[in-house]
Amino acid sequence: MTKRMATTSTRVAVGAVAAAGAVAAGLAGQALWRRRRPTGGEATWAPPPEDIGPIEAFDGTKLAVGAAGPMDAPLLLFSHGFSLDMTTWREQWTDLGDEFRCVALDHRAHGRSEIPSTGDVTLRSMGRDLATVLDAVAPDRRAVLIGHSMGAMAILALAEQRPDLFGERIVGVALLGASASNLLRGAMGGVTDLLRPRLGSLATAARRVDRLRKAILAGPGDVSAIVARVTQFAPEAPDDVVNHVLHLAERASSVVWTDGLSELMGMDFRHALPRITVPALVGVGDQDRVTPPAVAVQLAAALPEGRLFIVEGAGHIAMLERPERLNPELRSFAREAMGLGKGSGRKRRKGAA
């Protein structure tokens, strides 16, 4: 491979990963993780204290589910992003768990959940999984769903398939770092045409990205780490947060990076937005380069009861980068959606902005 071809291939891989919300960590994770482990060790990033899984999905896939907070408290169900897992909601369940029952799952093929025997990692199946978990943990209770990136899009897929759940059971949704369609164009302009092969499909392109990802992992880590920082995080993101996200994405299975990535690149759920008839909070970091604020503005405007919240000083992983700014908004939104009032319900956290 010539130097020019190698440079172009790397640019395509980086662009595709960033644009699809793949946390560019797959490019950087292995080299960076081996060099510098997260502050506090892996125990700092344990799942929620209560293990209430596995819960069996419609196709037999076993889903890992954890919870924190009082059993009888109002329910929040958390849905994580691409190549991540439930631990990325740590700052939410440790804060909001004083007032809410916080339930989080590992999506199929992610974290501790099984890889489906059929290889089905579609957003529609993830949407069905959300309904399954909701039925299992709170069959007769109302809930607010909170999703990040791919997890937010799984909520849109749920609305497409089960609009009957929105209103009676699901009384509000919070969509963080989300898009309803054209994810690549929204994040990286014309990179879709660069990524898509002249003769082939997005699935073919995603497989190429996965091969390039593995090749780049074998190279120097410094450049890859810079790529992850620039594409996914605001400059002030804590090192332990960056390292943890890198580690999660690095260890994600190849089926996530191939089938899952092509699914994200081709998704379009704009037709499902009118079915979300409940209050909807669209949150985005002011420095999010994967799903920029302009994308969030369009999404909020397209939702029947959409509202926009900009998380200052955050990139694409706002719930870990700036929890002290995001959590009070989530708390207030959830209380309002559940008819509990608009107050925060507790004193401000130490160190909050």
Image (spheres, grey):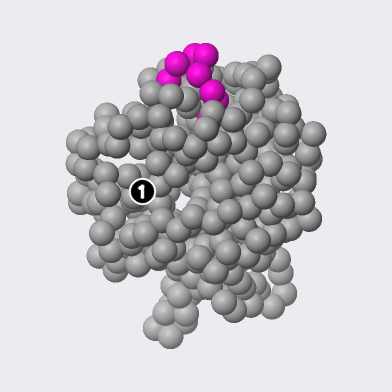
Q: Is residue 46 above or below residue 7?
A: above
Percent position (x, y) of residue 252?
A: 46, 44
Q: Is residue 6 above or below residue 14?
A: below
Check disc 1 and report the residue beneath it. Answer: 325
Q: Quadrant of residue 92?
A: top left
Please give the name of the residue rendered at 54% of the width and 56% of the height, measured from the top-left corner. Answer: 308
Q: Secondary structure at mark 1?
A: helix
The residue range painted magenta reads: 69-79
Amino acid identity at mark 1: Arg
Q: Nearer the viewer, residue 317 or 193?
A: 317
Percent position (x, y) of residue 268?
A: 72, 58
User: Can the viewer see residue 44?
Assistant: yes
User: Can the viewer see residue 265?
Assistant: no
Q: Is residue 72 magenta?
A: yes
Percent position (x, y) of residue 75?
A: 55, 25
Using residue 261 as the reference point, say whether residue 238 is left or right of it.
left
Q: Nearer the viewer, residue 74 or 343?
A: 343
Q: Nearer the viewer, residue 171 or 344?
A: 344
Q: Is residue 248 magenta?
A: no
Using residue 157 as the reference point, say whether residue 230 is left or right of it.
left
Using residue 201 as the reference point, say whether residue 179 is left or right of it.
left
Q: Is residue 105 above or below residue 326?
A: above
- How packed mark 1 is, by other alpha carbons closer than 10 Å (few <14, some 14-19, many 20 or more), is some
Q: Is residue 26 above or below residue 279?
A: below
Percent position (x, y) of residue 98?
A: 38, 23
